Amino acid sequence: MSQNNIPVSETYWSLVDKADKKFSKIRDLPYYERNRYDTYFYKVFKVYTQLWKFQQENRQKLLEAGLKRWEIGDIASRIGQLYFGQYMRTSDASYLSESYVFYEAVLTREYFKDGLLQDLNLANKQLRFLARFMMVCLVLNRREMVYQLVNQLKMLVDECKRTFQETDFKEWKLVVQEIVKFLKADTAFMNIFPLRYSLVLDLHPDCLPQVAAARRKLRLRDAILSSYYPNEVKFSELTLDTFRMLQCLEWEPSGSFYQSGGIPSGGTGTNTAQNGAPGPSRINYSQDIADPTLPPNPRKAVLYRPTVTQFVAVLATMCEELPPDGLLLIYLSASGSNISGSPNHSPVQGKGDSLSYRTGGGLHIGARGNGGVDSIYPCDFVPFTRKPLFIVVDSDNSKAFKAGFLPLTFSSFVVAILVVAINGVEKGEPAAMLLSPNSYPTVPSAVDSSRHPSGSLFTSFLTAPLQAFCLLLGISGPDVDTDMCNKAGGLLSSLLNDWGSMLAASDTLDPVWAQGLSDPFLRRLLLRFMFCRAVLTLYAPTFDKEEFLPECIPCLPEAFLPTAATFQTAVLQIANIFGATNRFVLSEGISLPESSEDEMSSS
């Protein structure tokens, strides 16, 4: 009995009921809006903290009163779920690490084990727990644990099918297929270098050069990441392309990728965790991921197959909440929609009207067959250009976001219609745009060259440029020499930093690019785009073919064209390391620097 003569069990169940009610309120809240739901989170977390502490202090009495181990595990699992949800709302990595710690405790203490195959409800709890923990480990880049959880999930699904024969576990079989397909596409090769911003490989923010043409300095504060393809590689609501962009816009804590075990071997994981210990370990893990010396991660809203209304609502909310020094990144990966404007619109309507906007089509972000209802058009972004936007479009119709002239054929004549996308009709803030190629070359390897089983080549260049270069040449997996990759990675980092210094020193750089060049994430995206453009411009199968080339709006200065000697030499240097110089078309007189030739002769 407590001091108030209330039985311990009664106090406990009262706390459980209170926690359940608060949890149900926060569980389905959206993962956006900067501070609106913080109060909800702290209230529900406070209750769960009380509940967790109470059961720890009164564990024996509660067990004697009938408390089961799976009920303790249920509390820990919900706390892990709360932490992960708050990470998704804030992008604060400390919440992600706390989620890992609670989920790992559930796993190692086997809270759901007793009676698992005698109780269908308990079996489903364990299945849901494994899937949620898998997502946390995936985002946290704990691949060894992911492989361990996949094996457990497979075995449990098989056991459940045999034990509960009257129940169809088709949904769980699909979950297994999803994660296996995801891991097959996102191979160890694609993770030989961290996708996150690593101070081991990238410049510290304090060391970035001053930008000569910058009238102000903006920071990437928020990002919207969305992808839609009918059969794209995904796990749960995280597609392969959005996963890579999510990782790319986060800090690698203290260079921990290299401190904790380095480059993964093989494509199926090992039995050794990244910290060198056998299997996962929670020792000092929170300290590893929560690095107080790094700036906060940009806040990200990951939208999985949103409706157009939902997409626009999130965009409006994030623009409204954007800090004065903030810039919003929008990443949109989707197939093209070539639906023209309504036939009721006259072809002579003026600049900025519906036909001008929609003649070039848009992007599908929903099921086909609904006309323009499920399509995003360039004009949908125009009202939000009152705030600084950095737009990345990865689509076979990305050029719809570029202004130009489009011929419209009528019965007896052709009229050239000015298609005004975004550039030139902004409402106050010129938008920066990186546009993917409309087509991709065939990749000469076993890796599927289409966008989706292996993900988009353009997104790969923005998130893992050296790996994308290798994939383009047909080099991947067991074909990769680790030392060669490390050498090429070091050279590419050096080249990109040189280009960054050149951009910063340029007095002809458009202010739209200059204002974001002091932000490490935006700077890195732009420099990787420049590398992608140079590679695809000079690559023999795509040479002089506009549909295979990415574009940026506004244009970079002429000195940064991919045909400039600086960029041709850079591509030659990288290609030379892999013995692939004959795969690129270079101008006469372009040759390796003497230092590169000396290194090759000595190796």
Image: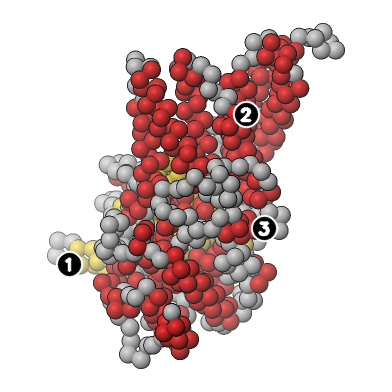
* Mark in the foreground, 2 or 1: 2
Dot 2 falls on a residue whose secondary structure is helix
Image-quadrant location for residue 292: bottom right
* Left or right side of 554 for 497: right
* Left or right side of 592 for 95: right
Kindly identify which residue carries mark 3: 295
Dot 3 falls on a residue whose secondary structure is loop
Residue at the image position 82 percent from the left and 8 percent from the top: 5
Residue 289 vs residue 231, the one in the foreground? 289
Work out whether residue 571 can be spotted: no
Q: Residues within 10 Å of mark 1 (few under 14, many from 20)?
A: few
Q: Residues within 10 Å of mark 3 (few under 14, many from 20)?
A: few
Residue 331, position as x, y percentages in the image: 46, 55
Residue at the image position 37 percent from the left and 66 percent from the top: 470
> Split into 4 quadrants, where in the image is the C terminus?
bottom left
* Mark in the foreground, 3 or 2: 2
Total of numbered circles in the picture?
A: 3
Residue 520, position as x, y percentages in the image: 59, 65
Residue 413: which numbered mark, if any?
A: 1
Task: Decide which of tag 3 and tag 1 comes sooner along the chain.
Answer: 3
| Residue found at the very far bottom of the displayed protein | 589
Task: Decide which of tag 3 and tag 2 comes sooner along the chain.
Answer: 2
Give the answer, above or below, for where 244 lies relative to 371.
Answer: below
* Mark in the foreground, 3 or 1: 3
Kindly identify which residue carries mark 2: 76
Dot 1 falls on a residue whose secondary structure is loop
The amino acid pointed to by label 3 is: Pro
* Left or right side of 183 for 113: right
